[in-house]
Image (spheres, rainbow, N blue to C red):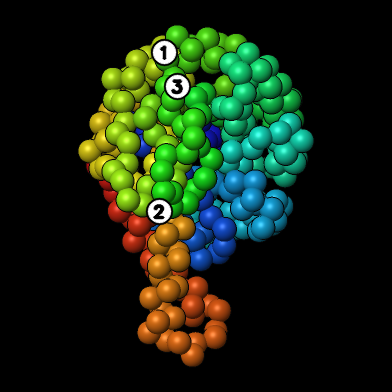
Amino acid sequence: MQKPIDYIKDAENRGVAIGHFNISDMAALNAICESAKELGLPIFIGVSEGEREFIGIKKVRALVSAATEEYGIPVFLNADHTYSFEKIKEVVAAGYDSIIFDGAKLSFEENVRQTKQVVEYARSVNPAILVEAELGYIGTSSKLLDKIPEGAGLHLTTPEEAAEFVKATGIDLLAPAVGNIHGMLKNAPEPRLDIPRIAAVREACGVPLVLHGGSGTKDEDFVAGIKAGISMIHINTEIRVAWKNGIAEFMKANPDETTPYKILKSASDSVKKVVLARLKLFNS
């Protein structure tokens, strides 16, 4: 059976990117898995600390395992943006396929120290687990924003930093700051990706790159970013907006409806449109 890293390296070799989509409920999970099955693609399901605490750390592991069996496609579970060693231990024990330690707000030296600790611990428990880390602060919120988060994008990841960080920590995947931000701006154009920087960072660090904060990014930047070295793309805010809008439109047309599965199907249908469009673009 292929490991998660095998699918990521295959995507890189073929010049495409794997989609990573976050969930908070079954409506989104079903929509994402249905989309991936229609296109015959592997998929990563992400759950932030808040998302997995809402669903249940072990429950979401069981749901994603069941989805893999039901849909007959590779569905991997990622512990998105995890900020402490204690939280890392929880998801490693629960059998997650990959983890992200986010020390982006720490000093470079402290980020290296804590990330290395995470790598050593995670692999001692599960040698096959993927460990990703973030280098460069791009904000933390997957929501609609009035302005760019304070401090986000002020320091973009350099090739030299990336190479040193990967060598010192032993991570499998790197999430650099390359002009991207978490969340979506409501009344301003999204920042553009620094494509030459992506290519330089990928060449220097020697591991696949992950683009965080993909929501709202221009299609041409996605295409160019993948060509430059991005192998996985995170989408969350677009999923949340689609989920909310689907329910809002349904309830406006059906104000007396109270059946949860009927209401949530509208969210699922709305999310599926977004996921299908993104997966087609990432694999074009």
Q: Which mark is residue 159?
A: 1
Place of residue 22 in the rendered image (x, y in percent of width and height, measured from the top left): 51, 50
> In the displayed structure, would residue 205 be above or below residue 8?
above
Q: Is residue 77 left or right of residue 59?
A: left
User: How far is mark 1 from mark 2, CA to CA?
Assistant: 29 Å
Q: Secondary structure at mark 1?
A: helix
Residue drawn at x 40%, y 70% is 246
Q: Secondary structure at mark 2?
A: helix
- Is residue 51 in view from this perspective? yes
Place of residue 257 in the rendered image (x, y in percent of width and height, measured from the top left): 49, 87
Examine the image and state in which quarter residue 8 appears: top left
Badge 1 amino acid: Pro
The quarter of the rendered structure image containing the N terminus is top right
User: How far is mark 3 from mark 1, CA to CA?
Assistant: 12 Å
Crowding at mark 3 (Cα within 10 Å: few <14, some 14-19, many 20+): some
Place of residue 87 in the rendered image (x, y in percent of width and height, measured from the top left): 72, 39
Q: Secondary structure at mark 3?
A: loop
* Label whose residue precedes the other's in the sequence (3 or 2): 3
> In the displayed structure, would residue 260 be above or below residue 152?
below
Residue drawn at x 55%, y 79% is 260
Which mark is in front, 3 or 1?
A: 3
Residue drawn at x 61%, y 53% is 51
Examine the image and state in which quarter residue 64 appears: bottom right
Check disc 2 and report the residue beneath it.
238
Examine the image and state in which quarter residue 171 appears: top right
Q: Residue furthest bottom?
A: 256
Check disc 3 and report the residue beneath it.
155
Q: Is residue 64 left or right of residue 156?
A: right
In this view, the residue in front, 27 or 50, is 50
In this view, the residue in front, 93 or 254, is 254
